[in-house]
Image (tube, rainbow, N blue to C red):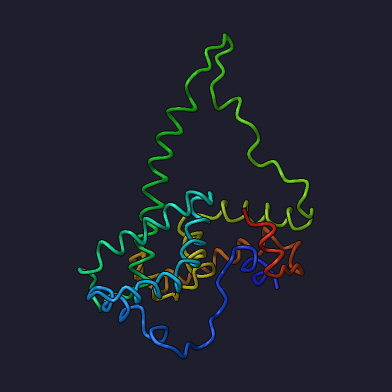
């Protein structure tokens, strides 16, 4: 029950019913091959198929909807630019998430350097206060959101941030983006048993942190209310 609530809040895509129309029946790899030869509809199908899980993964990494939209567009732009060099034997999802992951990492590094430099600048006051000292509380809760759902979202967000980076990344790729363990292993260049071990530790930590919410359940509409 708890894991189902987590998935609902974080936006894991639902399983799609079997497609019965072309090009929807085609594999991602075949769609990329067709797009590289000039079939624009093939790329549209890829975007429709993957934009939501990719966006959710990026959003949970960068935590800003506007930035997630920007990085999502950049991900697909890089896919477009690399279409002719895409190797058909490479799984599309692994390739696409590698691009998205690298963009998130690059932005985080640049943002960390920029934030450290700008926020540590003094305000010019006699007490030596810096810009960071006077920032507003960015975790202030909205009074219009149901308290119980807000508490759960805050605790979940905190629990995810407390996970070691390698465990959080595996959890998001598995439970938010819906990748298989072997795909994650390829993406992160790690043995599959290591990936499964990281997932197991992540789940154990989350269950411990969120034990009091074990009976909670949120439907899609509720999830939309609590997601940023």
Residue 192, quarter of the rendered image = bottom left
Q: Residue at x 49, y 27 (%)?
A: 119
Q: Residue furthest left?
A: 85
Q: Residue at x 30, y 81 (%)?
A: 30
Left or right of residue 119, residue 10 in this image: right
Percent of width and height locating residue 167: 49, 61
Visible in this render: residue 58?
A: yes
Residue 33, quarter of the rendered image = bottom left
| Front residue (pair 29, 150) | 29
Percent of width and height locating residue 178: 50, 73
- Quadrant in which the N terminus appears: bottom right
Q: Residue at x 43, y 52 (%)?
A: 70
Percent of width and height locating residue 226: 68, 57
Q: How many marks?
A: 0
Left or right of residue 106, residue 124 in this image: right
Q: Residue at x 44, y 69 (%)?
A: 195
Left or right of residue 157, residue 69 in this image: left
Visible in this render: residue 198?
A: no
Q: Residue furthest top?
A: 126
Percent of width and height locating residue 170: 47, 64
Left or right of residue 140, residue 95 in this image: left
| Front residue (pair 12, 198) | 12
């Amino acid at each position: 029950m708890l894991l189902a609530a987590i998935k609902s809040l974080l936006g894991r895509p639902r399983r799609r019913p079997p497609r019965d129309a072309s090009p929807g029946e085609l594999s991602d790899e075949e769609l990329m091959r067709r797009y590289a030869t000039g079939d624009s509809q093939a790329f549209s199908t890829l975007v429709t198929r993957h934009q939501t899980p990719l966006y959710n993964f990026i959003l949970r990494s960068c935590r800003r909807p506007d930035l997630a939209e920007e990085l999502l567009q950049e991900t697909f732009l890089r896919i477009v630019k690399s279409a002719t060099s895409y190797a058909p034997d490479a799984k599309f999802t692994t390739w696409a998430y590698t691009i998205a992951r690298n963009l998130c990492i690059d932005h985080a590094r640049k943002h960390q350097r920029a934030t450290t430099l700008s926020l540590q600048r003094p305000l010019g006051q006699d007490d030596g206060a810096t810009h960071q000292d006077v920032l507003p509380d960015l975790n202030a809760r909205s009074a219009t959101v149901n308290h119980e759902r807000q508490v759960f979202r805050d605790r979940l967000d905190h629990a995810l941030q407390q996970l070691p980076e390698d465990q959080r990344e595996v959890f998001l790729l598995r439970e938010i983006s819906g990748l298989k363990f072997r795909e994650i292993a390829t993406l992160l260049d790690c043995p599959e048993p290591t990936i499964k071990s990281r997932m197991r530790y992540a789940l154990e930590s989350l269950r411990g942190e969120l034990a009091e919410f074990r009976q909670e359940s949120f439907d899609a509409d509720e999830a939309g209310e609590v997601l940023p």
